[in-house]
Amino acid sequence: MLDPVSRVRRFNRAVTSAVGALDTSFLGRGRPLGAARVLNAIGHGRADVAEIRDYLGLDSGLMSRLLRSLEDEGLVETTAHADDARRRVARLTRTGRREFAAYEALSNTQAEDFLAQHSQREALLAAMDLIASALTRERVTLEEMDPRSGQARYCLGEYYAELGRRFKQGFDVSLSRDPDAKDMRRPRGTFIVAMSDALPIGCVGLKGTDYGYAEIKRLWVAPAARGLRLGRRLMEAAEDAARELGITLLRLDTNSALPEAGQLYRTTGWREIPRFNDDPYPDLFFEKGI
Amino acid sequence: MLDPVSRVRRFNRAVTSAVGALDTSFLGRGRPLGAARVLNAIGHGRADVAEIRDYLGLDSGLMSRLLRSLEDEGLVETTAHADDARRRVARLTRTGRREFAAYEALSNTQAEDFLAQHSQREALLAAMDLIASALTRERVTLEEMDPRSGQARYCLGEYYAELGRRFKQGFDVSLSRDPDAKDMRRPRGTFIVAMSDALPIGCVGLKGTDYGYAEIKRLWVAPAARGLRLGRRLMEAAEDAARELGITLLRLDTNSALPEAGQLYRTTGWREIPRFNDDPYPDLFFEKGI
DNA sequence: CCAGATATCTGACTAAAGTCAGACATCATG
DNA sequence: CATGATGTCTGACTTTAGTCAGATATCTGG
């Protein structure tokens, strides 16, 4: 009765019957589910008709009819794609935006109600994050972005906070050699953020130097996303980017208070080398030729 | 982007799209969802047609037709209810049991696959338990049962294990005044287990004595079910049972290492009294007239 | 035994989702 | 510029789920 399989199946049952309720945000506005889903996909920024169809898994005939019904309601306009007149691009009209906002408000209210009904809020949210990350693991995308972007800054903030918790002496970023943003932008380097359904859940920086090697910096994975081998994926992406930039040697520093990081490096072809900088925080140094 | 509402909505999206996959256990055997759900409900021991209809939320006409289609397939037989010939009772034929077993195997395999795909197994399972408990909170049923039953013994085992973790000196049940099972059975007392979807998630004992009062013992709530006010519900049920048994005074002992328990008692009409027994573990004693 | 309530069943219907083949315009490529 | 591929649209269709009214048999309480 308490074996792991039963527990998973209990979760499935609980969620399956709750999903009707979880998903009522798509109802209650007098529109069939299909049309509501298309409207919301467009509202969330998906414009290309083929992309929406793919995202929602719809047949082209069905998609066409759903779009037509939204057009008839005056919620959506479609135009030909600028580069390819076969493709159509959909966007919301003013009325459509209002309707979309109403759906958003319903969704938000419903989520708030759910939270309001439960104490143990933080535990519940953490559990939801963990499961959402596990379920969407395959759909985690790695995106290069400016290290000054909102998503990147969020990741870095979480990274610093975690170092503060895990280093005995705490962590003060101003004492560390904080990389210049321009060293983590092409063509010197790059910054990669792992996005799960619009939520940043991990990052890594590739920092260019003038010394014949580049450095890996700021590798971080959100607690809820650990165990999904995301660290490995991020490192591979950083190495790929380094190769594209013509870099042949990588270095990094880390701290023995982060054993899972050391473990990752050791099992992916990095070898320990002597200290190569005077940053006060790291006590382990690695190098890898690529 | 990281406010609680967004996190809940992200979970909903992740789960909604995964539930299609989670629920494929009901597909893949060439039967529409409705018929598969009825078959599985019967397989899981629901026999009364009205009960199945209620459980699955089906219209009586639809239910009738689904049953008929299962009968046509030779999977189900229906007979009149022994006490009330208007009601029908369904049960699986031999073929039906085989088909049900195939669904069970599919569900198990799918749950196993899910687990196999993810490391962080224990964390994931704990998160799933937490969410399942939160979602099914309204459907938690309190059932009186023999304290020697499997479910009761499971709860007690978990309870002792938790005391062992939380008491500095550990916990050895043989040193404590372990209540006699017959003192926690009617008419002396009772034992109540909270069941969530066939999983025991909490308990409380009402132990009769010969001294003009009864004692509350073994109040326990599974970690994944905390914060749902289940402790309160269990205590209310125990008090109701006590009133039915003509008991007018309740006592209990507890330990200050369990602050949430003390808090519960204090806010529900219990008042602290001096030690009334020589059990080595408790250091707090309460009384309540009902 | 009667009246009203209850459980199931049947027929007639609708809505929604989805499938499939073919039409049409447009694109990429040799 | 001919050819095959691509993206969208339309018409004709099926399956599934669900609703509703009424028929039938049975039960319960007076």
Image: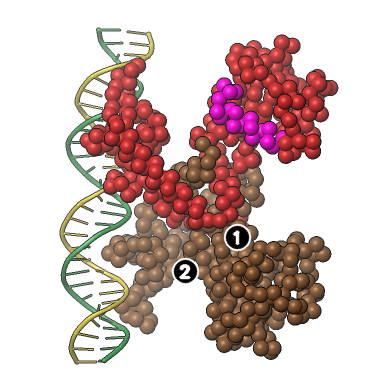
Chain colours: A red, B brown, C yellow, D green
- CA–CA distance between discs 1 and 2? 29 Å
Q: Which residues are magenta?
A: A146-163
Q: Is residue A151 shown in magenta?
A: yes
> Which chain is mark 1 on?
B
Q: Position of residue D30 (x, y in %)?
A: 26, 91
Main secondary structure found in the magenta portion: helix
Numbered label attached to residue B45: 2
Q: Which one is closest to the eye, mark 1 or mark 2?
A: 1
Q: Amino acid at mark 1?
A: Arg
In the picture shown, does residue A252 fall above or below A4? above
Q: Provide the residue designation for mark 1.
A: B226
Q: Is residue B116 magenta?
A: no
Q: Where residue A101 sits in the image (x, y, percent)?
A: 36, 39
Q: Classify mark 2: residues with Cα within 10 Å, few (<14), some (14-19) or many (20+).
A: few
Q: Is residue A131 above or below residue B259?
A: above
B15 to the left or right of A282: left
Residue B32 location, x and y as percent? 36, 53
Residue at position x 24%, y 37% from top? A73
Element class at badge 1: loop
Q: Can see residue B106?
A: no
Where, by quadrant of the figure, is residue B168 drawn? Answer: bottom right
Where residue A13 appears, as percent x and y from the top left, is 48, 56
Can the viewer see residue A289 in this picture?
Answer: yes
